[in-house]
Structure formats: structure tokens, C-alpha cells
Amino acid sequence: MKKEIVNKEKTVTSEINQYEKSSDSLMTNEKLNTRDLKFYPFFKRAFDIFASFLGIIVLTVIPVLPITALLIKFTSKGPVFFRDKRVGKNGKEIVVFKFRSMYIDAESRIKEYLTEEQYKTWLVERKIDNDPRITPIGKFTRKTSIDELAQLFNILRGSISFVGPRPITRTELNENYTEDQIMNLLSVKPGLTGYWQVYGRSDVDYKSGERQREELAYLPKRNFWFDIKLIFLTIPAVLKHKGAK
């Protein structure tokens, strides 16, 4: 019995060390090995097209998408969708869609809405607790991640994937990653969900370095079945409102 316990402990320790080695190597600028990913992009894109199209149809029929759009339209001024510029694969600028969860002047009058301390946090993390710019409906759509469902249209168009690093702004990219880390991060499409969204989400931040570590940890692990695993793990993370802001 003792021997079995010792062997299990060694196995667990080995797996932990392997994870830390892979994530630490990316944090220290090691280039990615893509030789085993020959057919992965094809299956990933095929899945993205099929699943996003099916998701849009189902969520329209249920009808989650139409009701969300109507609630946003009739409870606050402004468009139904919020369009934000992010950095996509190979550094290409992309426009990411979300259901609008903030007041229409949230960006133009940001310093009027936020305290000085909130503004400093927002500049680094792009998220803050108890953001006064969020509408009443927006608080619900963010808490349930319904606001993210508009990104199904981005997935169908091919600018992002179901699974990948979080789509971030160019400022976030340049201020929080080294040049080699940026090269690694931009070698794949951003994702609707991913390693950070499942294991960290808003509970980890750039300041501690944990967000960078978790975003980069996905890259050496990625394959079709690992992507499927992350998609299924996203469901309980969303239902528990893990890290939602």
C-alpha cells in the first residue's frame, strides 16, 4: 500500500513539474513546436464552423439571442452590439462583437465614471469590480456570460476560434508580454474560451503574472481533444459565475 502511495505521489509530482516546465519555458521565450499539429488546424476550423452555425441557430430559436437583443435595445440608449478592436492571429487587427453591456458613453467619459483607483486598475487589467459603467441588463449578461455569445458570429467568420487565448488589445499585449511571448501568443487565433477562462478568468491578473502564465500554458498543450475538454470545462465555470465581472 505504501509503495502504491509513493508511486502515485511521484506521478502527480511528475505531472506538476511537466506543466510548470512547459508554462515556464513559454514565459522565458521558448519557441513553440508545431510538428505534431499537421491536421489540427483543419479539424479545428471545421468544428468552429459547424458548432458556431449550430449555436446561432439554436440560440435564435430558443430564443436567447433575440430576447437579449430586445432587452438591451429597450433598456438603454445605444446599439445592441459592442464592437471592439483586438489583436488576432499574426498580429492582424480584428473586430470582436459582444452584446453591449455598458452605457453608450462608457468609453468617452470613462474618467467621469471611475474613481482614480478604478481607472488605474482598468488601464492594466481592462476589468474592475463593481464597474459603474455597466447597465442593469449588462450586469446580468456579464455574470452569465451571455454577452459573449455574440462572438459566435466572429467564430463563424473565422477571426477567432472557440478555444484559444483571450482576444486582447494591442496595449495589453505590448505592456504585459515580451516580444517572443507575443510571437507565441499571436501564432494562434484568439478564442471565445480557453485555458485562462476555465482555470483563472478574472480571479487572476496581469500584475501577478498569473494571467500571462495561464494564457501561454495553453499553447504547448493544444490539440483537438484538449480543446473539446476546455469547452466542456467552460460550462461549469460559467454556471458558477467563476471570476465574472
Image: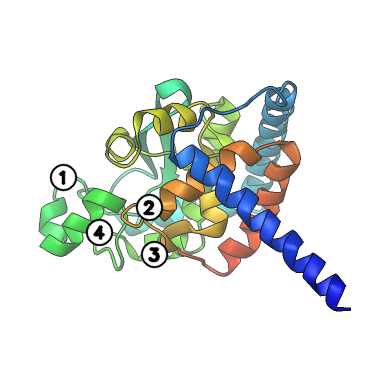
Coordinates of residue 33 in the picture (x, y in percent)? 62, 27
Task: Tell which of 83 and 192 is nearer to you.
Answer: 192
Task: Please report contact status of discs 3 and 4: CB closer than 8 Å, yes or no.
Answer: no
Tell which circle, 3 or 4, labels the residue nearer the N-terminal end.
Answer: 4
- Looking at the rendered image, the quarter that the N terminus falls into is bottom right
Distance, label 2 to label 4, CA atoms, is 27 Å
Pointer 4 with pointer 1, Cβ within 8 A: no
Q: Mark 2 — residue?
A: 209
Q: CA–CA distance between discs 4 and 1?
A: 11 Å
Front position in the image: 114 or 146: 114
Q: Which residue is mark 1?
A: 108
Up-down relation of residue 139 to residue 27 (above or below): below
Q: Which residue is mark 4?
A: 133
Which x, y percent locates residue 107?
21, 46
Secondary element at tag 2: loop
Determine whether 177 is above or below 8 in the image: above
Which numbered disc, 4 or 1, marks the residue that appears first in the sequence?
1
Residue 221, located in which quarter of the rendered image? Answer: top right
The residue under the point 53% across, 30% down is 189
- Looking at the image, the residue that sits furthest to the front is 3
Would you call the spot at circle 4 few (<14 residues within 10 Å), some (14-19), or many (20 or more)? many
Residue type indicated by callout 2:
Gly
Among the two numbered marks 1 and 3 on one chain, the one whose residue lies closer to the N terminus: 1
Q: CA distance from mark 2 to mark 3?
A: 27 Å
Callout 3, which amino acid?
Answer: Lys
What secondary structure is marked by label 1?
loop
